[in-house]
Amino acid sequence: MAQIALEEIFKGLPELFVPGTLTDPMSFYFSLGDTKKTVQLSGDNCNVADGRTVENADCVCKTSPEFFLKIWEDNYRPGMKDFMTGTIKSSSPHSLHDFLRCFGKDS
C-alpha cells in the first residue's frame, strides 16, 4: 500500500509544484524502499523520473516508504534524533526543507 501511495505522490508532484520557489535548479534522489525517484526542480519546472537519472544529486534522501509518507501526509518534520538514529539519511538535510517548500508543504 505504501508503494502505491508513493507512486501517486511522485506522479502528482508536477501539478503541486509552486513556480518561483527556487532561484537555482536542484536535483533530488529518493531511495524509499523499492521506490527510487529523481526529482529535478528549477524556477518554473518539476521533472520526476524513475531511478537515478543524475550522477550527483544536490540532495540524496534515504528512508522507509512509511517514514516518507509520515513526512508528506502527516506534516511530520524529522528532527536531529531521526537523522542520528538513521531513520532518515540525507546528504543535505536542509535541502529537504527546500523540497517540501516547492510543493507548499513547508508548514
Image: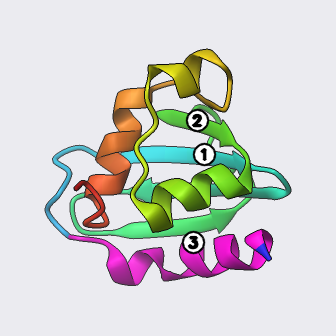
Quick one: 107 or 32, which is closer to the camera?
107
Residue at (43, 50) in percent of width and height = 76
Residue hosting label 2 = 60
Percent coordinates x, y for residue 100 in the rendering: 35, 54
Few, some or many C-alpha atoms within 10 Å of disc 3 (few <14, some 14-19, many ≥20)? some
What whole-number distance in Å separates the C-alpha atoms at marks 1 and 3?
A: 12 Å
Q: Which residues are magenta?
A: 2-18
Residue at (32, 69) in percent of width and height = 45
Residue found farthest to the top: 84
Residue hosting label 1 = 29
Give residue 44's quadrant in the image: bottom left
Q: Dots 2 and 1: beta carbons under 8 Å?
A: yes
Give residue 43's quadrant in the image: bottom left
Give residue 37's quadrant in the image: bottom right
Label whose residue precedes the other's in the sequence (1 or 3): 3
Which label was assigned to residue 51?
none
What whole-number distance in Å separates the C-alpha atoms at marks 2 and 1?
A: 5 Å
Quick one: 60 or 43, which is closer to the camera?
60
Few, some or many C-alpha atoms within 10 Å of disc 2 (few <14, some 14-19, many ≥20)? some
Q: Is residue 2 left or right of residue 106?
A: right
Which label was assigned to residue 10?
3
Judged from the image, the secondary structure of the residue bearing numbered disc 3 is helix
Amino acid at dot 3: Phe
As drawn, 6 above or below 86: below
Residue at (48, 68) in percent of width and height = 73
As drawn, 91 above or below 23: above
Amino acid at dot 1: Tyr
Quick one: 77 or 50, which is closer to the camera?
77
Residue at (46, 36) in percent of width and height = 78
What whole-number distance in Å separates the C-alpha atoms at marks 3 and 2?
A: 16 Å
Judged from the image, the secondary structure of the residue bearing numbered disc 2 is strand
Amino acid at dot 2: Val
